[in-house]
Amino acid sequence: MKWLDALIQGVLLGGMYAQYALGMALMFGVMRIVNIAHGDLVVLLALIGITLSVAVGLGPLPLVLVLVPLAALIGWGLQKFVLNKVVGADSLPSLIATFGLSIALQNLMLEIWSADTRSMSGGGIEAASVNVGGIYIGLLPVLILIAATLLTGGLDLTMRRTRFGRALRAAAADTEAAAMTGVNPRVVYAYATAIAVGILGLSGVFFALRATVSPADGPAQLIYAFEAVIIGGMGSIWGGFVGSMVLGIAQAIGFRIDPGFGTLAGHLVFLTVLATRPQGLMSKG
Amino acid sequence: MTPTPHLLATRSLSARYGDFQALFSVDFRIAAGEVVALIGANGAGKSTFLRALMGLLPVGRDMVLFEDQPVGGNPPHHMVQLGVAMVPEGRRLFAGMSVEDNLKVAIDHARKTGDKTWTLERIYRLFPILQEKRNAQVEKLSGGQQQMVAIGRALLAQPRLLLCDEISLGLAPKVIREIYEVLPEIARTGTSIVLVEQDVMLAQRASNRLYCMLEGHITLESTSSEVTRADIAQAYFGAGHEVA
């Protein structure tokens, strides 16, 4: 029972990571853009959400409706005004640009919100749970897992079946060939980053409901998203989801073995995958 | 009303890669429905010329005229909307995507004006093997099959001018014949073709007119059926070259 509980909690934790990994699977896995500010954007959106909930009294659902478009707009602007200037075969320029953005965002957030940790009240949903045969399952983590699954499925279908998805895959495979086939790669990339960051609007609300948030929390969220995408396999949207589950389960089981071992267990699994199957679990290669 | 004599023309087209000037004052023209070959040694500037026409290289606005309108320096996706499409050197297919998805990218972004001359079905009739392999990833195809995908992708953009860069390169003679057999059918639809080709004999046979390039300059312009071997040798290797 103890291990079944660990497995279930691990899957629920994986659902949380899967939301961060989804945007990362799109940007890093497909477009090969390294967005170091990914985690900081989640924190920024979470803090904006907390402030709005306190100042205006918005509940979680209206907040999502405000934050997702705002996040998409931030993503679109980030791609159009920063990343489109540095995209190319080399991913180093995007890494450096977003590393700078990450530091700037962290300092900006410190300036506005100070280093205090904050959290959002969701009217009881954050603490609600159901008892299933002796295992307590939190309502919020289940909601997060459902949202992550639906988003992953939706994005995967979008990538495989739609005009936009084909254009994005084509541009990622060969930007110049895509352009001579009539695609405007800059516009397609701007929409893709709008989607990747837009998802973080939802993640920001879930993050603020589930945990405490402070301006320096971004990099910790970033590393899990990176690891999930690499475990799952570059270029695969479901890969990011599977990688998140692997990380979540490894951490939950690690915590049961020893409370200090959980986070490390996740990293160890990541290193094991990197050493034995560097192309990732879901990759065809 | 004055008729439009040329679908596309260049006026003193010059282009450079950084400090290296690759094209010097190139004057070129192609009429609707015409097949024009562009021959020349490696590094003569043939591919650079096609890239300049496609909008992949920065050039002056007035250097490229499409139906007498200056279009030089337009981004490639604008050139596609005007009716220019390219089969690039080395095929440049979208790796990781199926044959059909590669073709669908072109359908999705095809020229919006004019008739839809080319359909997926028509491409499959032209190259039946592609229908059989439509769900295969393009990197699993043979070189000749990949070239067929590249040609199909360009045609599905509904071009009025098709730029073909070294479509015979690295292919078996039988496959080259198969691919060259479809060019007359393409030309019959009224599409003009610029054919960059290493094989001079092949280029001469398949074209109405030909240009020869040497070190970024046009050194010969002639009707393909009238040009002599000696003319070509001189233009290809430069003045002073003795024809054996």
Image (cartoon, rainbow, N blue to C red):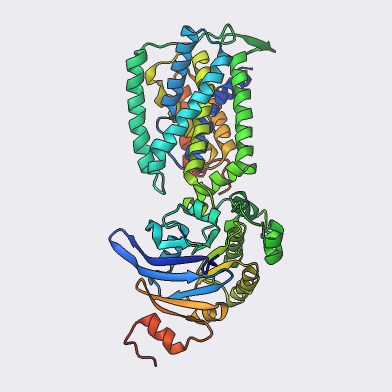
- The single residue placed furthest to the front in the displayed view is B1
Marks counted in the figure total 0
Residue B203, image x, y percentages = 52, 78
Residue at (53%, 10%) from the top-left corner? A58
B232 in relation to A255, above or below:
below
Relative to B155, is A156 above or below? above
Left or right of B64 in this view: A65: right
Residue at 49%, 80% (x, y): give it: B200
In the rendered image, the vertical position of residue A134 relative to residue A78, given as above or below? above
Q: Of B71 and A98, which appears nearest the observer?
A: B71
Query: Which quarter of the figure is the N terminus of chain A placed in?
Result: top right
From this viewpoint, is residue A150 visible? yes
Residue in the picture at 47% in, 18% down: A46
Image x and y of residue B212, in percent: 43, 77
- Could you say where residue B88 lies in the image, as x and y percent from the top left? 50, 62
* Residue that extends furthest to the left in the rendered view of this protein: B19
Closer to the camera, A175 or B174?
A: A175
Name the residue nearer the viewer: A226 or A135: A226
- The location of residue A272, given as percent across then percent down, is 48, 37
Do we see residue A203 in this rendering? no
